[in-house]
Amino acid sequence: PLTAIKRSIRFCYHPDGMPLKRPSLIGSWDAEGRFHENWDDSGRPLEPMADGSWQVTCELECRPDQTFWWGVRDSGEWM
């Protein structure tokens, strides 16, 4: 069996000049960072960076054969 390892993963979103209000990262993992098919709608708030990007770091339980999916929502709209 493949062993899972907790990793700090930094997600970075570049909106290409599009104004955002309160973007959140939403992905295919649960509150403990394990893969889950049902995405948590609450998400994690992204922090604005000086270069105009938005970032957040998440602790995810990663396996060599695991693929996570993620997206960004702002005010309920997918980006």
Image (spheres, rainbow, N blue to C red):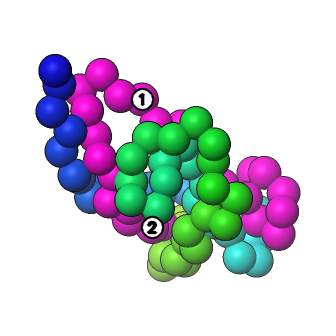
Q: Amino acid at mark 2?
A: Val
Residue bearing the label numbered 1: 67
Q: Is residue 10 visible?
A: no
Label 1 environment density (alpha carbons within 10 Å; few <14, some 14–19, many ≥20): few
Q: Quadrant of the N terminus?
A: top left
Identity of the residue drawn at 82% across and 69% down = 75
Q: Secondary structure at mark 2?
A: strand
Identity of the residue drawn at 83% across and 63% down = 76
**Above or below 31: residue 22:** below
x and y, in percent, of residue 64 in the image: 23, 26
Left or right for 5, reference 9: left
Q: Which mark is residue 56?
A: 2
| Front position among marks 2 and 1 | 1
Magenta residues, start to end? 55-79
| Residue 26 picture quarter | bottom right
Q: Which mark is residue 43?
A: none
Q: Earlier in the sequence, mark 2 or mark 1?
A: 2
